[in-house]
Amino acid sequence: MIDLDYLNFLENILTENRKAKFLKVLENRTKHFTVVVEDVFQMHNTSAVMRSCEVFGIQELNVIEERYGKSIDKEIAMGAQKWVDINTFDNVSNCIETLKNKDYQIIATTPHENDCLLDDFDISKPSALFFGTERDGLSEEILQKADGFLKIPMIGFTESLNISVSAAIIIQNLTNRLRKSTIDWHLSEEEILEKLMAWARKSIKDIKRIEGRYYADNQKHTI
């Protein structure tokens, strides 16, 4: 449960413009789609995917780090790490199981001929969009466990795109179609309150001191 009194306390510290911006952004946030990157060797590509998630309204990014343990490139992410929720997994199985338990279908993005073209993809079902490594694509385990396959139509000689470019194209297409649809894709009221709390805390300098003062004062009032 969200402590609404504490949230109100934090929001009183923020400017009106800041609070209005939070609400406007959250109106367009969704968990109907979530994005997964698997063992991306060049971490700046994961950072760029995160930035695309933030720009186009995807709230959660899932990162599988089975082989490469690297940190987010903050210069590439341009602050997106503050506003996107990042879930990390140490293997494919845990990631897929977690997402299936949240009722996501597993969609592998690949350039195979029999994949569904981007504009034909059914956006009605909550979907986890998997993107693979720059060199090898998605692992065989993901391809075997996928519920569907998705590809970007291309008419040139090149057979594939960089992961960050592919993710940006797919995320923009699907979220744009989603916002124009009648699908209930918005965050729940509880999720919005959780994000308001988290974003307010991230926006206030010296939050630990302010938080301590708030709870100390409230403890005095209850004695």
Image (cartoon, helix red, strand yellow):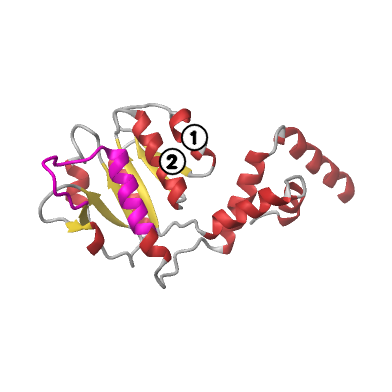
Regarding mark 1 in the picture, which secondary structure is present there?
loop
Q: Which mark is residue 89?
A: none
Identify the residue at image location x=67%, y=52%: 19
Q: Position of residue 208 (x, y in %)?
A: 71, 34
Which residue reaches farthest bottom?
182
Regarding mark 2 in the picture, which secondary structure is present there?
helix
First in sequence: mark 2 vs mark 1: 2
Evaluate if marks 2 and 1 touch, with contact meaning CB atoms under 8 Å apart.
yes
Question: In the shown orientation, is residue 106 left or right of residue 87?
Answer: left
Crowd rating for badge 2 (residues with CA inside 10 Å; few <14, some 14–19, many 20+): many
Identify the residue at image location x=45%, y=69%: 184
Query: Is residue 156 magenta-colored?
Result: yes
Question: In the shown orientation, is residue 12 left or right of residue 2?
Answer: right
Q: Position of residue 200 (x, y in %)?
A: 66, 45
The residue at which mark 2 appears reads as 51
Query: Is residue 206 magenta-colored?
Result: no
The residue at which mark 1 appears reads as 78
Q: Position of residue 5 (x, y in %)?
A: 76, 54
Amino acid type shown at disc 1? Met
* Near-viewer residue (14 or 189): 14
Picture layout, residue 91 above or below residue 223: above
Q: Quadrant of the N terminus?
A: bottom right
Magenta region: 152-175
Residue 57 visible to an observer of this rendering = yes
Picture layout, residue 38 above or below residue 124: above
Amino acid type shown at disc 2? Arg
* Near-viewer residue (14 or 198): 14
